[in-house]
Structures are given as structure tokens and as C-alpha cells.
Image (cartoon, helix red, strand yellow):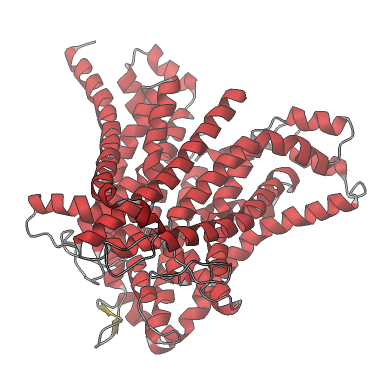
Amino acid sequence: MTSTGDSSESSSLPIGQPSLNKSLGRASLSASELISHILVRGAALLTIVTTLGILWVLVSEVGLFFSNIGVLDFLFGLEWSALIEPRKFGVIPLVTGTLMIGLGAAAFAVPIGAGCALFLSEYVRGRKKQILKSIVEVLAGIPSVVYGFFALSYVTPLLGKIFPEIQFFNALSAAIVVGMMVIPTIASMSQDAFEAVPRELRDAAYGLGARKYQVATTVVFPAALSGFIASVILAFARAIGETMAVTLAAGSTPNLTWNPLESVQTITAYIVQVSLGDTPSGTIEYSSIFAVGLVLFGMTLFMNLTAQLVVKRFHERYH
Amino acid sequence: MTLWQRIKSEIVRMGGLLTLLICFGFLLLLLVDVLGDGLPTLSWDFLVNFPSRFPAKAGIASAIAGTLWVMFFTAVFAVPLGVMSGIYLEEYASSNWFTNLIRVNIQNLAGIPAIIYGMLGLAVFVRWMDLGRSVLAGALTMALMILPTIIIATSEAIKAVPDSLRMAAYGVGASRVQVVWSHVIPQALPGMMTGVILALSRAIGEAAPLILVGALSFVAFMPSGPMDSFTVLAIQIFNWAGRPQDEFRMIAASGIILLLVITLGMNALAIYLRARSVKLS
């Protein structure tokens, strides 16, 4: 992620913003200056309010749920049957379903995304590069529901020819289409990281007689490893939060299995199932969407923070 | 170069090219599949009819209207707020721990799944502010979801404006508001527009938050104001695609063609604007 790097570098300019702030001073603020300052500051503060709002909503709504279901029963229970008697609220099947599709999508997208990134940064130049990159990014511009449709109407029937025992709703086709969706996340972030590797490093390797493929695989890739890893973590976080495609493709059967040919239910698919049904609010079933939502929020927050940390801590500094 | 080195060199190059071709292959397959299923049932009647139990009579008019209503209000809320936040971060905020916290927080907000924003919208806009399952509640939810994208794009665009420009304006006595309005924003406009268009196109295709906020899947009337109930294209498509009958699958594909024309069209516009701004600078 080069953007984080940029922000710290721009302030080191001799005529950067901080000095501007000081030189203007409070005394020079006119009424319009003051109002605009308050407005833009308020807008920025809204982002903090949003985060607090999300936390507050999730935490306050799970009260009802956890006053009926034990936290340990929820976190370690192996059965999820929220809408059908006998009701069981063990979140593990939803978590394994979510992770299976996330891992499957990553297994699919990481080699392809890395290959695209390396090829675009090392082997193509100029206008051709811009065009090829734009086409890869179209994959990210296609709505999630379209990938769900594609999984049902094309990917699953195709997989059925290879694995005749495959279920109509299955984790594999969901993982494949979610993998397609997150390829651009890996490709474009990694490409930025590869291109940020300084020229001197490549020149030094060429000077020692290295070939282009050796420079790409033994100099550029290791030097940009932190950016690449961060892109993979972010892609994984996107994959487990993905909703419409997995709901359509993987179905809504809470299922403790690692068999990708079976139908599974992800956390997001369960939330959709409850929202579309006629479960009245104020019931345990209803409040359970906030409990699983909290789990999902925790997982993605952890991964986003890890990705930012990886970029910050392990970023090789060359200048 | 030894033979072995030559082989390895070709493997790396062809491997990279192959991954790129796989991406293009997917894209092509997806488009061919959707066009094959959806073109036969895409007609004028499909665009102007309401949804129906009978696939032959079903249309997407109320979803088009709902999408337009929701996106209009989403843009009204998200664009000014996002641009102002970006301006604050780049032009006003001093670099201290609090500004850093805001930046890290925005990065995180950009990574929070869409469906979590739906839960926020359900609790805050639908119930707490009592807006009900309305266009307005949906638009506010979508606005919060795309806000981080717009802020990040605005910041990047403003960061690219050279400092010499600001110095020159300050030097002839411009106030900060004048510098921002007459120099920074015009320069950063193409970059900001690119970000705004991409964010809005993401919102058009995203159905998950609106399912939580309570968009309906069967709307046989035109929403006529911000407090009406509604459905959007993505939810209507989701509803049809999930049904077992082939006829519904076909009209789902027809809806997808319309959705793709809109979202990919907006993406193309964004790419064009970005390419042009790169050329200008």
C-alpha cells in the first residue's frame, strides 16, 4: 500500500502543510474561514462517529442474544440451527463455511493476482500497461450479485461435469467466483508495491549479470513482499465479507464440513437469510444476526489492521 | 544465456502472461454467459413493466426507479461529506496523533464488509431515527458505506496538487478558503470525480446493505419520494437469480445486462477521466 507511505512523506516537504497551519495562525481566521474549518472538520469527524456507531450497534444489539445463549456455547458450539427447532446457536459451522470460501477464494486469486502484478510491472510498458491493467480492474467493477448469477448458471454446471456428486449450491463455485472478484485487489496493490521497488536495486542485479526473470523473482518480489502480503490479507478480508455472490452460490445450509462440493452457509449468507425472512425483531433469532455480525466485524477488523501493520513494520525503506 | 536459463525465463514470462489471459478469459466467459441468457428477454416491455409472478410479464421498472432514487440521495449525502473530509485531511489537519487516528480509521472503514453497514443502517436510520424501510434510510446507509472510498480518492487527488500552486496563491494574499476553492479543488477535480464515480458505481451494484435496511423484492409501484419503500436493480436480480425456474434466470440475466451497462459504463468513464488527468499533469 503506497498510499500510507505517501502521506508520511509529503509532510516532510519544507513547505508542507504543518508549517502553513502555523504561519496562518488563529488571529487571521475570518468568519468564513472559521465556518469552513468547522464544516470540513465535522465531516472528517463523522468517520469516527461511523466506527463508534457500528461498534455501538453491534454491542448493544447482542445483549438480548447473550442473555439467552452462553458466550462459550456460541463461540465453540458445533451446531447452528437458528431458524429450525431444536434451536442451536453454535457459530463454528458458519465460521468454517466463511473461512472455507475465503481460503478457497484466496487459493484461487493469489497466484493469478501475483502473476498479473508481476507481469504488468516488469514486462509491459506505457499505454499497453494502462489498458491491460484497466481490463483486470473491470473484474472489480462487476457487481457481486452478477458473480452469484454466473456461479449458478455457468460455474456449478461446469463443475458438475468434473464432480458428478456436486450439490447445486456448493462452496467451490462460490470460492471460484469470489476469487475472481478479489483478483484485482491483489493485482493492483501488488503491482504498486512491485513498481515502488527502486531502480537502483534492479540495476545492481542487472549489473551482476542477472536476467530479467531473475530480477523479477529474486529482487523485485522479495523487496515488495510486505505490499504483496498486505494485498493478500485485504483480499481475504474482502472475500469473507462478500455477501450476495456467496448467498446465491453456496446456499444457506449451516454445515460443519471441509468438503467444498457441499452447500455451506457463511456468516453473511445467514444474515441475509434472516433479513429476507419474516423473523420478528426482538427475538433471539433476530438478535443472532448481530452476534454473528460482531464475529465477522472482528475478523475483518483484525485482518485490516494486520495488513496496515505489515505495510508499516515490514516495509523496506530504501531512501 | 544457457538453455536452462532461457527455459526458466520463458516460464516466468509466459506464466505472467497466462495469469493475465485467465483474467480476460473469466471476464469474457461471464459476459458471454450473461448476454446469452439475457439478451432474448431484454425488451422495452421488460424495462417498463413491474415485477410479476409470471416471468414473461415481469419487468424491472420499479427497480430502475428505486435505484435512481437511492443513488440520487446517496450522492447528495456522500459527495459533499467525502470531499470535505478529504479537504480537511489534506489542507487543514495538522499532523498529530488524532489526524493519524482518522486516517487509520478511514482505511478500516473502507475494509468493513458492506453488510455490516446494513446493520448500522437498520439500527440507526430505520429504527432509531424512525425513517422506516424508505429510500432515505437506504441512501443514508449507502452514503456511509461509500464515504471512505470518496475520502481516500479526494485525499489522493488533493495530494497530487503541487505545493507551488498554493504558495503562489497565498503569496498574492489569498485566504485558505480561496486557495482551496479556486486553486486546489479545480486542479484536483478529475481525480475526485474518478473516485466519486467509482464509489457510486460500487453502490449501484451492492445489494447487501439494502437487504438489511429492508428494501423489498416485490415492488409493483413507482417510488415517488424519499420516504417511499423501494427495491433496487441488484436486489431484484438477486431475487430472480435465486429462483429455480429457468425463465426467471433468463430475466435475471436481462436485468444484469442493464446493471452491467450502468456500472461498467461508469467504470469506463472513471478510467477515461483518470487517463486524461494523467496526460494533463
- Residue at x 22% of width, y 56% of height: A152
For the residue pair A214 and B255, the one nearer the viewer reads as B255
User: Hey, which quadrant is residue B161 in on the image?
Assistant: top right
Residue at horizontal 70 percent and vertical 30 percent from the top: B162
Rendered location of residue A26, percent (x, y): 89, 50
Please state if A7 lies on the left or on the right of A71 as rendered.
right
Above or below, A277 against A106 in this view is below
Q: Residue furthest right?
A: A27
| Residue furthest out toward the top | B1
- A225, A86: nearer the viewer: A86
Q: Residue at x 75, y 47 (%)?
A: B92
Q: Vertical placement of B205 versus B125: above or below?
A: above
Q: Residue farthest to the front?
A: B45
The answer to whether residue A314 is visible is no
Q: Residue A206 at x, y = what percent?
A: 38, 14
Q: Position of residue A148 (x, y in %)?
A: 29, 56
Quadrant of the drawing holding the C terminus of chain A:
top right
- Judge left or right: residue B127 versus residue A90: right
Q: Is residue A89 left or right of residue B65?
A: left
Q: Is residue A76 above or below residue A32?
A: below
Q: Position of residue B1 (x, y in %)?
A: 24, 10
**In the drawing, does residue B9 fall left or right of residue A226?**
left
| Residue depicted at 35% across the width and 25% down the height | A216
Q: How many marks?
A: 0
Which residue, as the protein is rendered here, is positioned at the far left?
Answer: A164
Near-viewer residue (B65 or B100): B65
Decide if residue A251 is in sight here. Answer: yes
